[in-house]
Image (cartoon, helix red, strand yellow):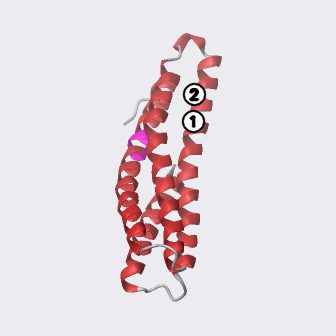
Amino acid sequence: MITSYVLVALSGVGLLFVGANHYFNFWPTSHITLDLLVSIIFIAAQTLVMFFFVGTGVNIKEYTLSHPEIGDKFYKGVLGIKRKLYPSTMMVTILFMTAVILDGAFYLGKVSEWWFYIFYVFTLYYYIKATLTQHKAFIGSTNIVLAMTGVVRK
C-alpha cells in the first residue's frame, strides 16, 4: 500500500512535468522520451493500486469462506469499494495514455497541440479524482480487514 502511495505521487509529479515540458521545454531530449518514462511509472502505479484491491478482495473472500460465522458482509463491503475505485482508476489511465499518444502525434506534426491540452486537463482532473478515491478505498479496505479480524485501531 505504501508503494502505491509513492508511485501515485511520482506519477503526479511526472504528469506535471509532462504538461510543463510543453511550455518550458526543459527535458533535454524529445517530448516522447519524457512521456514514455512518466507513462511507465503511471501505468505501474495504477496497476499496483488495482492489483492491491484484487488481492485484498481475494483474501477477504477466502477468510469469509473459512469463517462462515462472520457472513459475507465484509466481502460485499470490498465489492462496494471496488465499484467506486475501478471506474476512476481506469478513466485516468485511459485519459493519460490518450494524452501521451496525442503528445507524440503533435511532436510528429500529425495533430494540433490543442488536442493534447484538452486531454491533459481532463487527465489532471481525473488524476485528482482517482487519487482521492484511491485514498478513501485504502482506508475503507483497511477498516474492513481490521473489523473482520477483530483488531481495534488505536
Which residue is at 55% across, 87% downward?
Answer: 29
Does the magenta stretch mainly form a helix, a strand or a loop?
helix
Q: Nearer the viewer, residue 92 or 151?
A: 92
Q: Position of residue 90 (x, y in %)?
A: 50, 47
Identify residue for label 2: 60
Which residue is at 51% across, 89% downward?
Answer: 28
Q: Is residue 54 left or right of residue 153?
A: right
From what the image shows, is residue 86 above or below residue 26? above
Q: Is residue 45 left or right of residue 24?
A: right
Q: Nearer the viewer, residue 151 or 67?
A: 67
What kind of residue is marked 1?
A: Thr
Which residue is at 51% across, 80% downward?
Answer: 109
Quadrant for the C terminus in the image? top left
From what the image shows, is residue 80 above or below residue 92? above
Q: Is residue 23 magenta?
A: no
Q: Position of residue 139 (x, y in %)?
A: 41, 40
From what the image shows, is residue 111 above or below residue 52? below
Q: Are marks 2 and 1 in contact (CB under 8 Å)?
A: yes
Region in magenta: 134-138
Q: Position of residue 152 (x, y in %)?
A: 41, 29
Check disc 1: other Cα within 10 Å, few if <14, some if 14-19, many if 20+: some
What kind of residue is marked 2?
A: Ile
Identify residue for label 1: 56
Which residue is at 49% across, 29% downward?
Answer: 78
Check disc 2: other Cα within 10 Å, few if <14, some if 14-19, many if 20+: many
Secondary structure beneath dot 1 equals helix
Task: Mark yes or no: residue 43 visible.
Answer: yes
Quarter of the rendering containing residue 22: bottom left
Q: Residue furthest top?
A: 69
Q: Position of residue 24 (x, y in %)?
A: 37, 85
Secondary structure beneath dot 2 equals helix
Task: Mark yes or no: residue 6 visible.
Answer: no
